[in-house]
Amino acid sequence: MTTSHAVAGPAAFGLRGAPSAARARDPRPGIAGLPPDALGAWFAERGLPAYRARQVLDATWRGSETTFDAITTLSADVKAALAGAFRFDTIADTEVRPADGGLTEKALHTVSDGLLIESVLMHYPARAASRERHTLCISSQAGCAVGCPFCATGELGMERDLETAEIVDQVRHAARHLAHDGRRLTNVVFMGMGEPLLNLDRVLEAIEALNDKARFGLGARHITLSTSGVVPGIRRLTALGPQFTLAVSLHAARNALRDVLVPLNRRWPVEEVVAAARDHAAATGRRVTYELTMIAGINDTDTDADALAALLRGDHAHVNLIPMNPVAHTPWTGSSPERIDAFAARIRAAGIATTIRRNRGTEIGAACGQLAAEHAGEAPPIVVRRRRERLVAQSAAALRGERSAEPVPAGVGE
């Protein structure tokens, strides 16, 4: 799958399809978003022993239960009280599509107000040099406000931030699925729908829950947080000092081109983004990963490779090159394997570690937002044509070195 920071632009192009079936959001918080001390306080307020809270905690994070009723150690009265106050699962429905011979599973989740979010479970069999891994890519927002025109999520526009429980329930769903076959989730990446650093409070709560030994117990070094370049959010992460991996969806090292590919670059230019990431690497000792979605004739030239090498030379960094997944309403195509190989060789010659990634699940639309966009319906052909024409003009100007005069996407913050 490609990185996912999606397009605020489609709203401007009038591309958004039929909206999700809107309904009122369930006001009950998800139980998985509740810290252990808050759950303990809820039981204490009702004069119930502390071990009851631990039973609920274990059922939430380690059990196979999917409802409060299924927790056999609780009385009917306690189950009813819990169900009245909390949701055991914030995901109302899930559609799963397998691909790659079962190595990739794309899940389309419906949350309580009818919005659609996505997660992707990727399986990596054991090899001589590595253990078996099961990596889940999760969403932090329904839609996205950033504006990357090669990303399918942007065709949906921005809906809302996800609640903490809505984020971690994607993980619980995948973990229960794996447990059926005696397997366990080994890695979580915040690289699905949305920009995590624009929902940072809830994302940090989700990471705390995933890392907490009393809850999911996943080591911080098995968690990757991706951003398209929200500099204040990167700086905040650095001050907190977490040990998870920071990934930056860079996509271009030249400002004029990145203005088009990652429109919040108009607010935080690429040099500021890399400087913040560099400081994060220095403070945490953790290597920063830079993601580039490779687009034929747009950001895959020798000039782009040399600009990237100059930008990252000497940094504690790793570059992932990912062919662009086909995305409706976009005039571009993914770079050829030969062009990506040449690009990678040029970066490696500058001493920068580089990996060429293979897209997973292309036959099921595993790029972020593709299944949800499919459910949203098609935009009118004339609107699609105008958007394509505008992107062609914008990218041509960028390749001439002209900075964008477009405003920063609404909702990316200051």
Image: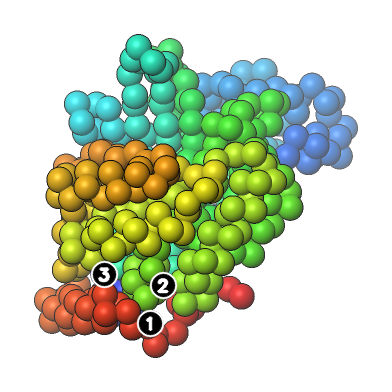
Q: Which residue is mark 1?
A: 403
- Given residues 377 and 407, the one toward you in this image is 407
Residues at marks 3 and 2, CA–CA distance in whole angstroms? 31 Å
Quarter that holds the N terminus: top left
Q: What element does badge 2 sit on?
A: helix
Q: Nearer the viewer, residue 389 or 342?
A: 342
Report the amino acid beneath label 3: Gly
For the point 79% across and 21% down, the residue is 51
Mark number displayed over residue 255: 2
Residue 372, percent from left and from top: 30, 55
Identify the amino acid type marked 2.
Answer: Asn
Residue under numbered circle 3: 17
Q: Are marks 3 and 2 in contact (CB under 8 Å)?
A: no
- Are there few (<14), some (14-19), or many (20+) residues within 10 Å of tag 1? some
Q: Is residue 249 left or right of residue 151?
A: right
Question: Which amino acid type is shown beneath numbered disc 1?
Answer: Arg
Q: Are marks 1 and 2 in contact (CB under 8 Å)?
A: yes
Question: Do labels 3 and 1 touch, CB within 8 Å?
Answer: no
For the C terminus, which image quadrant?
Answer: bottom right
Give the Cα separation between the discs numbered 1 and 2: 7 Å
For residue 161, which numbered disc appears in the image? Answer: none
Most extreme residue toward the bottom, as rendered? Answer: 405
Q: CA distance from mark 3 to mark 1?
A: 30 Å
